[in-house]
Amino acid sequence: MSAVDTLSPAITGVNTHKKQTQEEQDLDLEFAFLSRSFQREYLLQQGAKRLMDFLLAVMLIQALLPVFLIISLLIKMTSPGPVIYKSLRIGKHNEPFHMYKFRTMHVDADAQRDALRQQANLQGNLFKIKNDPRVTRFGAFLRACSLDELPQLINVIQGNMSLVGPRPLPPDESILFESPYNMRFLVKPGITGLWQIKGRSNLGFQDLCQLELNYLLGWSILMDMWILLQTFPAVLKTRGAY
């Protein structure tokens, strides 16, 4: 028996132990989150969050109505197709819903998505590429200023999104999340979040996972307010917005 053969069982045992330890850590995180989600203080804060979401979304739509009308007119003038783009996303409890955005791409954009994903060689990462050929000229401006996200205020009023939360993703990207990061589906996705204020598309998939896990485990209504305040300077910097 060679030295390699002799050492292999020991090495395998160490690797198995490490794997079990990681699995135990993931279970501990999930248990901590679930335990907290049934506490009275957490439930009261969640109620306050929903009230804040609804009231702010209504006020913002009313205040930004002229902006909605101008953007809608310019979209119609610059490219054929609908003003609003409905994108299928996965929400709380893995429930699918249609997320609303101002259309920033040509009408055949979805048909080109798979081919572009293969060309980009993303290898399991989220689909987001610079200089996307499907984006219209006016659409690029809307994306840089994050104005294309404004119709998601309607999703907030409907109750399938929040102002702050994990990034809403399509079905083919939602399946990429493993434990403990799939806890993101225990809360509503948000228009903004830690991912948006920390760099957006400049960040990798693992960065997104860790930021969202930090948000879930450390959430409070004050954290949401802080993220909302940080969103405005992040939008002005346009870092990672494309």
Image: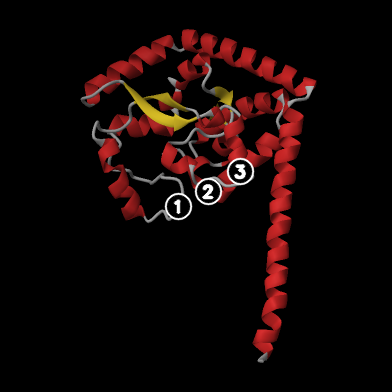
**136 sits to left or right of 154:** left
- Which quadrant of the structure image shows residue 109? top left
**Extreme residue toward the left, this view:** 80
Counting residues from the start of the chain, the first of labels 2 and 3 encountered is 3
Q: Residues within 10 Å of mark 3 (few under 14, many from 20)?
A: many
Question: Which residue lies under the disc numbered 2?
Answer: 205
Q: CA distance from mark 1 to mark 2?
A: 9 Å
In this rendering, position of residue 156 left or right of residue 172 = right
Could you tell me which secondary element the residue under label 2 belongs to?
Answer: helix
Q: Residue at the front extreme? A: 1
Left or right of residue 220: residue 116: left
Residue depicted at 69% across the width and 75% down the height: 11
Question: What amino acid is labelled 1 in the image?
Answer: Gly
Q: Which residue is mark 3?
A: 181
Which residue does the numbered mark 1 point to in the structure image?
124
Residue 35 vs residue 208, the one in the foreground: 35
